[in-house]
């Protein structure tokens, strides 16, 4: 079998092998039901360990590309089921389907992704963090046992201190550790909402929140954000009066998908509105530490003089989404209901990772990490903005983020871009189609472009490709979908 | 300050220090708002590192015993809030409140616990498992990034193979990785039930399931289990016809809290009933590997010829609850709805731990681990059964488990045991009060005794104490609650 791999790549060798076997299968070079070489033979042939080939085969099997029978060997599946980025342009994208793609996009070798608002995992301080992972059997009783639902005591203390930078003055008791912002938002939604309720969101907003709300039968109502990150506050007030939403969900600092921030004067005005009408604001602060400006806008929670703000954050963007650790700071009556619901949902987060994160925070790891990564992300942002400036046609507009990991691109009104996302994937680049971020979807005119993971070279190549595809679609009618198109991966 | 600690204890030194400071505070030796020594001073005085004292102070602060102000020091809180096992006998216990206690009972030094159905964390193969935790920066892109909601591909392959022993023949694609059985049951409940629905459960049953069902407005209806683990199947059929339950939840193998198993002929009869009436069975197989018998009863899923069984399991009892990793095997339409809901709840489990577990499973770790721990658990079970036999008064009955971690004790009808749980805690031993496991609670007559964690010596001392307290309460009327009682911890 013709398989090349690069030992110096950041993509593990087993995954490179798996991806190339997928390509062989897709191209028909390995027909359905044909037999793959034995693990031993392929390992010898490629000069890798058997474990590497085993891992590659495991991945193929798990994703349905192959089937394996003990004693008989591994065979190409009768019907392969490639699973990533497979949306045909005529199919409506849903947040759920698209989240499913995003969670796996990093595994699709051959696809260069600007789709996921993730930090670059190659920058994660693996070795430093690993020194905080307990391998001491004497600690087993505390790190391998159940932990309190509210979180590991040591981590709650560290998070309370960590939030002082954001202007929050909270006791460790007020910290609820959660499995990432998504779990925090899901708990808040479940406690505060009943099916049929409405929640106000920025439009566009975090697609995970749209999925969470809809999963619980809650209707997201979008309030348009402008390109500078300002909300129409009159519309907020009107909707609050008309629809009595259960809360207003915002990513006020380095917003997702726009990268913009709510102006400070609007923060004060919004808090005054919340106080006046008695509505709750759920503030998602997940991107705030990733700043390329002198000053980070203050957290709404820090400016609030009442009990009107629930503050949610996580270490997914600062460090790594794989930690699955975040926090919720909520008024105390809500805090205890959230903790009780967490006991009904999954009991607690893994204490091993909680304790390791506590040690890393105590050692001031985040400051060191940010000193190292922020210049790189700033450079990637600048590369992206310059590339858009250089290539985009008149009439296209985009946000200019001072922090975070995303830019929101709006294409000119004079064109048909219904197949643009699909065409980009065909060319080997993934962006995120805008409609999945919108409470009231408008197909085809928006893209989210994320600059956290790609190198500057990839960003330039991706935007060049994107711009060429955009120009082809200017002033056209319905763009024909190529017959016989099949998913890339 | 008078603080003694034992470096050879399995309780970490910082926790021993924290617990003794709590005792000083409880006893009034450290009054409210008094100042604790600085970290540096106490560390020098005790001959420990500053980190140890910092950890002890963090734990005190997090639990509300102390308050700390940067630059001013650490002070005893104005109002201390001891949080564990504080139920007064006159207060109704709830599953939620009791789960909260159980999650933290291991942290209460001074209390010897037979309350939690957990394996002994001192037996967890920390060092062996740690060799499978990736600290390779080249793997960062896959273990520190988001993972697919369905689970890490390598882990799904390993779980599919691991289930072959239980007679399940499943593809990796059918495996949904979840954050422990509790998350699996919560997802299933949310997908299948609406508020007001009913679900049949064994009575007594897993208290977490009672909390989960009630959190989602679902009514658990109990079907009595007898002391040998047999269900009244006529009653099951009658309730199915009368109440159209959304499903029947069972721990058929080494049940919690009883330790009994559903007889094999009843398994077949129950599957026939499910097929006849079209109801779903949710099988919780969490204890099945912990067997002290020659043969483990077959899984219901393995005996089912239709699509009537959802199989849920985890590594919490086999290895460690701290992993927070389990699995759900469900019919395919349900599988995809569960995965979609997981994307709305917390996206995925930490890929670092998933990949490590996959490596551990691939290396046949569970077989080695069970060879080592099963003789110890068997010895603890035998010690417990002998102690009950030796000490309990006539009329007390208990289950005789062939696997799992618990015994269910039923006290004679001629006595008043309303304060028994409270009296045990006062004597320094924690058992679990029976009512929290019951869909239709009967106060005072039942206890769950868990033998996974305590040594044989502790088991004997605990049962001696328990038996003395039981005998004091035989043939009495209402037992008076001591005035001025305060929680032990």
Image (cartoon, coloured by chain):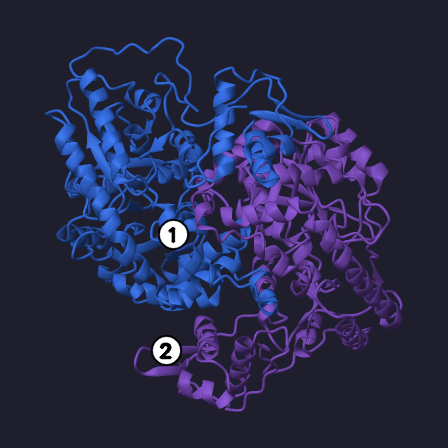
Chain colours: A purple, B blue
Callout 2: chain = A
B89 and A369: which is toward the camera: A369
Badge 2 marks a residue whose secondary structure is strand
Q: Which residue is mark 1?
A: B124
Q: Which residue is mark 2?
A: A68
Image quadrant holding the C terminus of chain B, namely: top left
Callout 1: chain = B
Q: Which image quadrant is residue B106 in? A: top left
Q: Label 2 to label 1, Cα distance in Å?
A: 32 Å
Q: Which image quadrant is residue B44 in? A: top right
Task: Estimate the x, y position of residue B129 in percent, counting from the top left.
Answer: 43, 59
- Whether residue A337 is visible here, answered yes or no, is yes
Residue at the spot x=50%, y=27% of the render?
Answer: B3
Mark 1 neighbour class, 10 Å CA radius: few under 14, some 14 to 19, many 20 or more: many
Query: Is A375 drawn above or below residue A458 in the view shown?
Result: above
Image quadrant holding the N terminus of chain B, namely: top right
């Amino acid at each position: 079998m013709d398989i090349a791999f690069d030992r110096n790549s950041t993509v593990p060798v087993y995954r490179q092998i798996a991806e190339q076997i997928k390509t062989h299968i897709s191209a028909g070079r390995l027909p359905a039901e044909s037999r793959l070489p034995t693990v031993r033979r392929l390992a010898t042939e490629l000069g890798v360990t058997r474990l590497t080939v085993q891992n590659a085969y495991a991945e193929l099997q798990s994703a349905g590309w192959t089937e394996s029978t003990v004693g008989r060997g591994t065979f190409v599946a009768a019907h392969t089921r490639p699973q990533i980025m497979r949306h045909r342009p005529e199919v409506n994208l849903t947040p759920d389907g698209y989240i499913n793609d995003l969670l796996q996009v990093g595994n699709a070798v051959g696809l260069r992704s600007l789709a996921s608002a993730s930090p670059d995992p190659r920058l994660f301080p693996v070795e430093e963090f690993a020194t905080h992972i307990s391998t001491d059997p004497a600690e087993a009783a505390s790190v391998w046992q159940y932990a309190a639902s509210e979180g590991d005591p040591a981590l709650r203390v560290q998070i309370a201190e960590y939030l002082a930078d954001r202007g929050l003055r909270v006791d460790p008791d007020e910290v609820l550790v959660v499995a990432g912002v998504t779990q925090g938002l899901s708990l808040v939604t479940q406690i505060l909402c009943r099916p049929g309720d409405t929640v106000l969101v920025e439009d566009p907003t975090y697609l995970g929140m749209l999925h969470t709300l809809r999963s619980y039968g809650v209707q997201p109502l979008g309030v348009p954000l402008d390109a500078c990150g300002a909300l129409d506050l009159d519309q907020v007030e009107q909707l609050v009066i008309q629809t009595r939403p259960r809360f207003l969900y915002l990513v006020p600092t380095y917003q997702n998908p726009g990268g913009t921030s709510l102006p400070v004067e609007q923060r004060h005005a919004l808090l005054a509105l919340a106080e006046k009408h008695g509505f709750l604001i759920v503030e998602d602060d997940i991107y705030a530490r990733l700043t390329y400006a002198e000053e980070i806008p203050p957290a709404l929670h820090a400016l609030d003089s009442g009990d009107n703000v629930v503050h949610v954050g996580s270490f997914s963007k600062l460090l790594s989404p794989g930690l699955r650790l975040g926090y919720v700071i909520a008024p105390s009556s809500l805090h205890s209901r959230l903790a009780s619901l967490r006991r009904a949902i999954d009991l607690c987060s893994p204490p091993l990772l909680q304790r390791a994160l506590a040690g890393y925070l105590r050692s001031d790891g985040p400051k060191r990490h940010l000193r190292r990564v922020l210049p790189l992300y700033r450079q990637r942002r600048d590369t992206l903005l310059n590339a858009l400036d250089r290539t985009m046609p008149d009439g296209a507009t985009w946000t200019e983020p001072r922090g975070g990991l995303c830019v929101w691109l709006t294409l000119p009104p004079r064109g048909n871009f219904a197949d643009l996302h699909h065409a980009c994937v065909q060319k080997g680049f993934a962006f995120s189609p805008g409609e999945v971020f919108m409470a009231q979807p408008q197909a085809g005119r928006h893209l989210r472009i994320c600059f956290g993971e790609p190198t500057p070279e990839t960003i330039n190549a991706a935007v060049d490709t994107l711009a060429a595809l955009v120009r082809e679609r200017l002033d056209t009618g319905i763009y024909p979908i190529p017959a016989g198109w099949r998913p890339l991966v």
